[in-house]
Every structure is written in structure tokens, then in C-alpha cells.
Image (cartoon, rainbow, N blue to C red):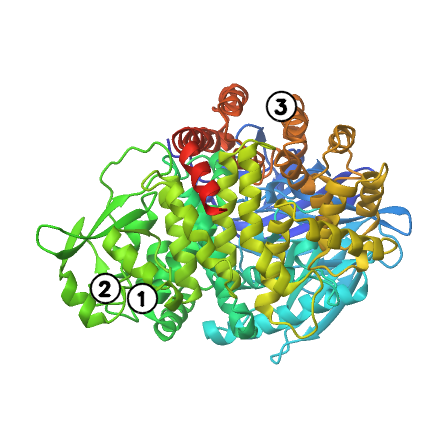
Amino acid sequence: MTVKRFYETFHPEHYDLRINVNRKQKEINGTSTITGEVIENPVFINQKYMTIDSVKVDGKKVDFEVLEKEEAIKISTGVNSKAVIEIAYSAPLTDTMMGIYPSYYELEGKKKQIIGTQFETTFARQAFPCVDEPEAKATFSLALKWDEEDGEVALANMPEVEVDKDGYHHFEETVRMSSYLVAFAFGDLQSKTTHTKDGVLIGVYATKAHKPKELDFALGVAKNAIEFYEEFYQTKYPLPQSLQLALPDFSAGAMENWGLVTYREAYLLLDPDNTSFEMKKLVATVITHELAHQWFGDLVTMKWWDNLWLNESFANMMEYLAVDGLEPDWHIGEMFQTSEAPAALTRDATDGVQPIQMEINDPADIDSAFDSAIVYAKGSRMLVMVRSLLGDDALRKGLKYYFDHHKFGNATGDDLWDALSTATDLDIGKIMHSWLKQPGYPVVSAYVDSSDGHLKLSQQQFFVGEGKDVGRQWQIPLNANFKAPKIMSDKEIDLGYYKNLRSEAGHPLRINVGNNSHFIVKYDKTLLDDILAHVDELDPIAKLQLLQDLRLLAEGKQISYAAVVPLLTKFADSKSSVVINALYATAAKLRQFVEPESAQEKDLKKLYDKLSAGQVARLGWKVKPGESDEDAQIRPYELSASLYAENKDSIKTAHEIFTANEDNLEAMNADVRPYVLINEVKNFGSHNLIENLIKEYQRTADPSYKVDLRSAITSTIDPAEVALIVDNFENADVIKPQDLRGWYAGLLSNHHGQQAAWDWIREDWDWLDKTVGGDMEFTTFITVTTRVFHTPTRLKEFKEFFEPKVNIPLLSREIKMDIKVIEGKVDLIEAEKVAVNNAVAKAIN
């Protein structure tokens, strides 16, 4: 059933918002005065959790009805033309991190709060009555008042212009935009500002709990990113400001509110003198992602939530493009290959996964569309695929056309393909429809046919776990390193006599070169042996791809995991961080085949030691001045592997570093700090170490250090300490609700803490639902559970707990898929366990 959209009854053109926030009473009072066109009567305006005091149309009071289930106000306006609808209301100020809400922090021992907003997807209706749909674009004039204290500042999408006699702060009228992009905040904030070469004000804001230097990195990235995008998009940034605000309590990673972007503190602020290289790259890509949205999502917005991917996929691709333009020596594209590509390939191989573009009729389904591995990761792979086909010149030309024709309006995916098609002879829409509107992806089998000696390719949908093949086909960009068609449209193609192709190419034949297309390759023995014989000649991405594809084929039972084990040592001495990432991503999968503390796990630990010992000896535990970025990125993988291997020298060295830094753990080098702390907790935990680390976690405002402390604390092997951690799960003074998933996942993945964490989530699910249940991130509590579980017992318990919740719209798809994921792992382990453990035993001898 298609739900009627409120935009069909009323087209808003301008909002005058007068909002008074009382922090002490935890209440909002306001008026939303909307000028717009009445399309039909009655008119429907969104509201949620509000008390509506009165409704006036053109100055006269009219009858209205509040429809709680529909989150609406039903208004008979009595007019069929332009009208001014004035709605007076009040609403609670909640702690859900949605709508208008307080963020809590400590400064000099005192608890303080700032107020911020989060309106995506449908939470603007909790702040002010509005037509809360992406297509209902309008301009907004905001007047904001609060129980103001000395020194506090207010921020919004546009600059502040005045404070009136009644104490309301007025802001410049916005450009035409969607309601979910409105944002404001106020509190005791510090800031650093600069300007772009075109005069756009760039600012970074945070609470005064942070050191001023923590704002510097973000300020530089934000300024350079705005300038980069103006040039790349050939379209000017249309606002006078771009402010970046770190909120102490924030559910999502960040939010692209136009002109006032909000972030988790961990994704904006960092100590430039002591933050790991990985964390710097992560923060840079989050900032460039949100600023890419200022054009792609804000200037041009999806028409409806079924085209959510249009916003997110593009920003996901552009974040890497921008950082690569700003910091070419970082080789940030490799991070795309180690994060986005595997996330998309893993998630998209489960039968029942959503397509990128999914039908959304009921507003209750909107949040379920935010599947990050599909909408963000797979979607961005699609656009990387398009970029690879077009080249940057054609891409930029097509994008300029897109912005010129749709700015300040709305668009669909087809509008983008039409725009890009103006710059190429390829039918981009035809190619992309096969990827966007059906779920999954193909495995392309490349084989030499024994009957005629021809090289042939065939495509078939790839599944991990049980999957029903319904004959889906894709338009596949092959990216071959030999003579082959650009696009594979058919189920099977014959490329001709293999020996001739091989001779002509002069190197092993490969497809999906660059790993830019969303498929995996299954080479037959002839082709794979040829590739492995020349493996040293492959570039790092090709090596990563080889391990990635073999790992997935093993997950899908198309080859044996036992066949992958002997290959690992071939890559152990690589000087490329992406290869080492792929190596340990594959090795980590072997852990599911062993029981904790069994003889088989001891063998696996010996294999980890064999893989890591040479690199640990080469790199050491101490960061060397002037060492390469690659070495800086390889070291964490190797130290982690060495500690899992229980290497005596590593355990001793890490303990010595801890002892030397015991009086100031935060100052320890951030690249080795998490591993030193984990080692200390697991191998040298004194009676009160965990309690002291928890106090450190509460004390520090450094978000990177907090993550390191959490990783260490949740790795404890002591049952009493596990119980202490679980006792703090619901104590917001220790663990903020926004951070709880990371704590839960950390303890769950520690077999000494798994039972306690699993018992907690089952026993206190209602509390969890009440605390973070309205949030689009809520389903990830189920996802992280699924990543850990792989035994028949846990599968049974998972089903018993979650199957009764399968009819809850937000949870339904996740529960169904995750049951299949765990079932697939249980079946795989049963089938492969003996062979894998035998292969590991053989590899260490």
C-alpha cells in the first residue's frame, strides 16, 4: 500500500520558526508559521510528541485534529490557494538523540550540557510542525530563545543577525532546502575559524572540555574540502558559512545539515600531536563525506527516501576522491578497498538483502533503508564503477549538468544517469539499473573449456549461505588486462582461444583489474596457477583482491578454506598495508573454526606468530622518526596478530612500554597504545587496573584515547571485571548510549565476556529499545551480535530471542538476514572444520 505523502496536500514555501527551549523544564514552546500553497483539503502537517495549542489560517483560528499514529495534524483550511498556517505548540525535550536534545559533558568536575539537533530522517517533526518530506523544500527563518547563561553562543544553518528585545536570536533566512537539513545548537562552545579563498566562513566548534589544538586538523580539512569541491563540481558553495560542530552525544557518525554539520566528537576532533594515522584518515574522510553532501544531498536532494542511496553513495565515493586530492601521499583509495569493498561484498552476498534502490511506502520503513553496507558501501562501489567507465573529465561535465539543472530542487537516480549520459556514448542508465534495482552481485567464473581450449566467462549470483538463484543478470564492466568486451551483458561469453590470448597479453589473464567493479572472480586451476606463479608481479590492490575473492569463495563454499591457508605465508612479508589488511582479514576468519583455548587454537596462534614475527622484528613496537606511512599502517596489524599469537617477546615489550608510561597513559604513542593496554589487561591485570582504566575513560575528553581504553577494558579475562563492565552498560555517566554498541560488541567478541554481554542484551532489551530504539543505528546491535555468533547453540538462542521480534518494521529485514548469516557460518564450520585445522597444522610445520 502506498502511503499518501503530505506534500500532495500542501506545498510549503517559507517557514517562520519561533522556538523557545527551556533546558531546566526540558520543554520546547514555539510557533511554526508556514506560508505555502494549499493543494487539497484537508491539509496534513507532520508533528510528533507535540501538544498543539492552536492552528490559524490567514490569522483566523480553524479546527484541527491531531493524528498520533500518522504523526500528523489534520487541518481544514477553508482555502484552496496560497495560505499562511500558524501552529502554536509545545513538546518535550528528550534524551533520545533525535529532534532537539541535550548533549552532556563534564568540565572541571561540573556536569554541563549543550543543545543540538538531529532531524534526519523524520525527526524535524519533533522540533516544529512541518511537511517533513525531502521534496517539501522551503526557506526557513529561525528565531531561537533559551534559558541563556553567560558566554553561550547559538549556531544555525545561517549566520546570526540580531538578538531581539525578547531575547530571541534571529538567523538569516536559509536557501530553499528540506526540513531534515535544518539544524541549530547552543551552549558554552569554543571555536576556530578561517575563510576559503572565496570568503566562505569555515568554523569548527566544540565544548571547552577539549584542548584548542584538537580543532585544528578539522579546520584545515574543512576549508580545503570546500575549495576542492567547488572546483571539482564546477559549482560554487551556495552558503556564507560551513560550520562543523562536535556534539558530546550524537547517534550517527555525522550529519550533513546545510551550513552547520554535526559530528560525533570522535569523528571531528583529534590531537594533532598524538593520533594514529588510521584515525586521521578516518576523521578526514568523515569530514569530506559530509561536505560532499553540501552539494550532493543538500543543493540537490533525493525526491523521496527510495533514492537515499543517491545522497549517501555519492558522498561515500567523493570523500575518498577529495582526501586523495588534498593528501595524495596518503593513498586513501586503498582505504576504500579495505573498508567499503569488503563491507559491500560480505553483506550483499546474503539472500534477502535489500537492493540499493528499494521501494519505501510506509514512513516506518525509512530508517530500515539505512543499511550502510548497501546504501553507502555498495552504492559507492557502483559510482566508482561509473567513474572508472567515464573517466574524471566526463564525470565532472555530467555533474555540472546535474547541478545546473536540479539545484535547490530534488532529483532521482535516473536524473543523474541522464546527466552523466550527456558526457558519454555509454547508456549509463541501462548499465546501472541492473545493479541498483536488484540485490546481490555475480561471481564471474573464468575457465578454459577443455573441449575447445577457449577462455569462457559465465556469471551467476553469488551467495554466502543458502540462496535461491532466480536467474539474475548484470551488466558487468569487465576491466580485463587482455582483449575482452568492455561490458559483459550475457550469461556466458566466449573470448576465444586461451593460448592466443595469453600469448598476446604476455602476462596472466585477469578481470576486474583495480577491483572497481562489484563482482568477484572464480578462476579455474589453469588461470589461478598462472596468476600465483607471477604473484610477486601483482600490484597491492591485485594481491588484496586475490585474497578477498578467495576468502569469499570459501565463505560461499565454492572452494575450501583449507585451500586458502597455504597461500597466507606468500603475503606475510609484504610492505603494503592493503595486502597486510587482506592477509589478516582472511586469517581472522580461521578463528571461527577453533574452540577457544583448544589444541587447534594453539596451532592457529602459531600460524599467526609465523605470519607476524618477521614484520614485528622489522618494525618494532616503537614508532621510528621518519618511517613511511605504509609501515605506520602495517604495525597495528602485526602487533595485534603477535599478541593473539601470545608471542613472549611482544608480551614482554608491551608490558615494559606500559610500565614506562603508567603515570600518563594518554601520552603514550597512539599507534601502539591500544595494543599495550590490551596486553596489560589480558596478561598483567592488577587487582584495580580495570577500575583505573574506567576512571581514565570517564576523565579524558580525547575520543581516540577513549576507543583505545574501551578496547582494552572489554578484553578482560576476569569474571568479576566482566560483571563490573556490564553493570556500567546502563550508567550514562560512564558509558554514553551513543558508545554502548562498541562496548557491547567488544565484550561479546571476548569469549570470557560473551555470555555476560549476551545475557544483558536479552534481559535488558526493553531498556535498550527505550534508550536508543528510535534511532536508525539501532539494528546494528543485532548486526554486531551476528558477526560474533557461529555455533549451533548461539544460533538457537539468537532465533529464540529475535524471531518473536521479526514483525517490528525496523528490525524485520535485519533479523531474517542475520539468521541466514549465522546458519551459513554454522554449516560452513561443520563442513570445513577438520580440513581447515589440518591445513593450519600443516602450515606451521
State how far apart marks 1 and 2 are (Cα). 9 Å
**Neighbour tally class for label 1: few under 14, some 14-19, many 20 plus, Cα within 10 Å:** many
Find residue 422 and report its horizontal and vertical position in percent. 29, 69
**Neighbour tally class for label 2: few under 14, some 14-19, many 20 plus, Cα within 10 Å:** few
Question: Callout 3: helix, strand or loop?
Answer: helix
Residue 762, label in figure? 3
Question: Callout 1: helix, strand or loop?
Answer: helix
State how far apart marks 3 and 2 are (Cα). 51 Å
Discs 1, 2 touching: Cβ within 8 Å: yes
- Who is closer to the viewer here, 435 or 588? 588
Foreground tag (1 vs 2): 2
- Of the two numbered discs 1 and 2 on the same chain, state the one appearing first in sequence: 1
- Label 3 is placed on what type of residue? Arg
Give the side of residue 418 with respect to residue 263, left or right: left
- Label 1 is placed on what type of residue? Leu
Find residue 356 and report its horizontal and vertical position in percent. 39, 47
Question: Callout 2: helix, strand or loop?
Answer: loop
- Who is closer to the viewer here, 82 or 559? 559
- Label 2 is placed on what type of residue? Lys
Residue at 57%, 31% (x, y): give it: 598
Residue 151 can be seen in this image: yes
Find residue 117 and report its horizontal and vertical position in percent. 67, 48
Q: Residue tagged by mark 1?
A: 389
Measured along the vertical axis of the image, is residue 585 above or below residue 287?
Answer: above
Q: Residue tagged by mark 2?
A: 486
Residue 286, label in figure? none
